[in-house]
DNA sequence: CTGAATGTTCAGTATTGACTGAACATTCAG
DNA sequence: CTGAATGTTCAGTCAATACTGAACATTCAG
C-alpha cells in the first residue's frame, strides 16, 4: 500500500508546493492534491493524517480553510461518526471566480486612486488609468471565459 | 510636499498590501504603486527611499525583483550618476503573461499526474483530467484576451 | 458509567523571509 | 588624492505563520 503510492505522494507534495507559491499553506495544497487523486474521492480526517503524515490539528485547520475558499466540502454518512472531505465538483470554476473578485478589488482600488489624483494633469493620471482599464477588462472578460468553460463541459458528467 | 501627499501615500501602502496578498514582498508592491502615480514617472533609488521610507538595501533588492518580473525598468540619463526606475509600458500585459506561465506549469503538473494514474480506472482519473482541461483551457484563452486588450489599446498612446 | 473514537482549540516551537544598518565597491568632482 | 554620492552585498534582527502535541469537548458503544 505504501510503495506503489510513493510517486503519487511525491506528486501530491509538488502540488502542495505549487499552491504554496500562491500564498496558501502547503498542507492545504497537499490536501487538495490528494483529494484530486485519492481513491475513494471521499477521505476522512484520519485518512488524511495517515496519507499526508501531518497532525490532526493541521488537517482540521487546513480543511476548514479549503472549505471557506469553497474548494472542498464535508460529507457526513449516516451511521458513521467520521466526517469525509471531497473536492467540490465546481472547484476550479469557483477558484477562478475568486480571482475575479480580486480583479474587482484592484479595479476599485484604482478608482479610488484616480479620485485622489483628480486635480492632477491628465498625463499624470494616464498610468493609473491604464491600470484601471486593464483590470476592468479582465473583470468583465474572465467570467465570460468561465461561463464558456462551464457550458463546454455541461454535457460531459 | 508632505501633507498633500499623505492620502496618496496611504493609497500606495494599500497597493502594497494587495500585492503582498499575491505573494510579493510588500515593498515591491509599494514601489510599483508609487511608480504608478509618482510625478515624474521616473524615480531614482533615493527618491524611492525618501518617498516610501525604506532602506536603500530594501529598495535595491525589491527593484531588482520587480525588474526580473518584467514590471519596471531602469533608465540611465547621460551625465547623471543616478539610475531611474519607471514602470514598463506593457506592465500589465506582462504580469498576466506571467500568470499564463503558471497555467502552463499547472497543466503540465496535471499531465504528469495523469501519467502516474495511467493504470487506474477512468472514473479515478476524471477529477485530475478535469483539472487538466481547465488549466489547458485558460492557458489557451487568456493569451487571446491579453492580445485583445493590446489591440484595443493600440491607437491610444 | 467507562472508555474509545473523532474532532477542535490553544500554547509553544520552528522556520521562513522581509527588512535594516553597516561594510564594501565604484564613480566622479574638486 | 580626498571625499562625497550612489548602489550592492551581507550579516543580524524581527515578525509572521505553519505546524505539532497536548488538553479539552463531544459522541457513542458496551
Image (cartoon, coloured by chain):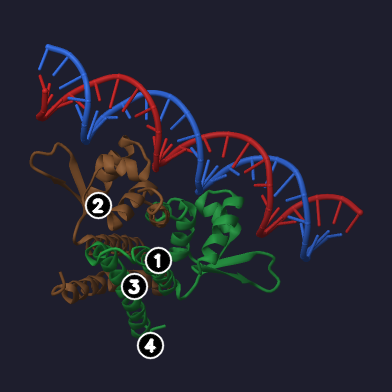
Chain colours: A brown, B green, C blue, D red
The chain to which mark 3 is attached is A
Contact? badges 2 and 4 (CB < 8 Å) = no
Where is mark 1, residue-wise? B112
Residue B63 occupies which quadrant of the picture?
A: bottom right
Residue B34 appears in the rendering: yes
- Residue A49 relative to residue B89: left or right: left
Name the element at disc 3.
helix
Q: Quadrant of the C terminus of chain A?
A: bottom left
Where is mark 2, residue-wise? A69
Q: Residue at x 36, y 45 (%)?
A: A52
Spatial CA distance of label 3 from label 1 is: 34 Å
Nearer to the camera, B96 or A111: B96
Where is mark 3, residue-wise? A134
Nearer to the camera, B5 or B114: B114
* Badge 4 density bin: few <14, some 14–19, many ≥20, Cα 10 Å: few
Name the element at disc 4.
loop
Amino acid at each position: 500500500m505504501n510503495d506503489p503510492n510513493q510517486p503519487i505522494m511525491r506528486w501530491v507534495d509538488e502540488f502542495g508546493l505549487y499552491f504554496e507559491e500562491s500564498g496558501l499553506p502547503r498542507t492545504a495544497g497537499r490536501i487538495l492534491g490528494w483529494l484530486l487523486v485519492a481513491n475513494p474521492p471521499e477521505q476522512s480526517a484520519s485518512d488524511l493524517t495517515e496519507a499526508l503524515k501531518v497532525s490532526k490539528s493541521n488537517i482540521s485547520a487546513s480543511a476548514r480553510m479549503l472549505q471557506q475558499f469553497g474548494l472542498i466540502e464535508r460529507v457526513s454518512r449516516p451511521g458513521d461518526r467520521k466526517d469525509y472531505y471531497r473536492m467540490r465538483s465546481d472547484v476550479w470554476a469557483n477558484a477562478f471566480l475568486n480571482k475575479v473578485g480580486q480583479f474587482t478589488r484592484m479595479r476599485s482600488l484604482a478608482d479610488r486612486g484616480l479620485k485622489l489624483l483628480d486635480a492632477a494633469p491628465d498625463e499624470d493620471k494616464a498610468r493609473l488609468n491604464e491600470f484601471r482599464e486593464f483590470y476592468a477588462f479582465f473583470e468583465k472578460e474572465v467570467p465570460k471565459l468561465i461561463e464558456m468553460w462551464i457550458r463546454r463541459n455541461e454535457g460531459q458528467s
